[in-house]
Image: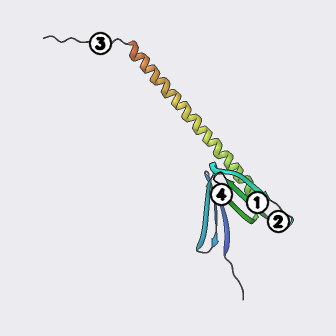
């Protein structure tokens, strides 16, 4: 009796989220976490894990969910890439917020200027001849 297993785990890192896909052929489980919800990335290294270059990783979220997996190859590289992408995401988010704040300030100043100009101009009244 020979057991053939087509089980695989795939980790995908996009610009906004981390995705883990795991399954056997057509039965695939997928879980994704936006970078804004990742609270911690934890790695456990063991002697046997180092020998086979495969260790444990756990990604905790602010919502209480966890993505855990044993025997992950190059686990330190995966952790580094996740943390790097989180930093990039945060930098982009702060830049967007700064642009939005600057735009809102410019719009508010323009409204103030227009209001002052409108208040400074006397109203023209016209009289009708009967």
Q: Residue at x 58, y 39 (%)?
A: 96
Q: Which element is circle 1 on?
A: helix
N-terminal-most mark, 2 or 4: 2
Q: CA distance from mark 1 to mark 2?
A: 10 Å
Q: Which element is circle 2 on?
A: helix
Q: Nearer the viewer, residue 71 or 62?
A: 62
Q: Are marks 1 and 2 in contact (CB under 8 Å)?
A: yes
Q: Are marks 1 and 4 in contact (CB under 8 Å)?
A: no
Q: CA distance from mark 3 to mark 2?
A: 85 Å
Q: Which residue is mark 2?
A: 49
- Mark number displayed over residue 75: 1
N-terminal-most mark, 1 or 4: 4
Could one spot residue 76 in this view of the protein?
no
Few, some or many residues within 10 Å of mark 2 (<14, 14–19, 20+): some
- Mark number displayed over residue 124: 3
Q: Which residue is mark 4?
A: 65
Residue that lies at the very extreme toward the left in this rendered image: 130
């Amino acid at each position: 009796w020979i057991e053939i297993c087509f089980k695989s785990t795939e980790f995908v890192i996009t610009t906004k989220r981390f995705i883990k896909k795991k399954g056997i052929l057509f039965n695939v489980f997928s879980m994704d976490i936006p970078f804004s919800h990742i609270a911690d990335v934890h790695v456990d290294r063991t002697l046997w894990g180092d020998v086979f270059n495969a260790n444990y990783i756990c990604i905790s979220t602010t919502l209480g969910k966890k993505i855990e997996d044993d025997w992950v190859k190059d686990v330190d590289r995966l952790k580094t890439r996740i943390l790097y992408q989180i930093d990039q995401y945060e930098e982009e988010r702060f830049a967007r917020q700064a642009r939005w704040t600057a735009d809102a300030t410019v719009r508010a100043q323009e409204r103030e200027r227009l209001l002052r100009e409108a208040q400074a101009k006397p109203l023209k009244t016209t009289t009708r001849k009967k």
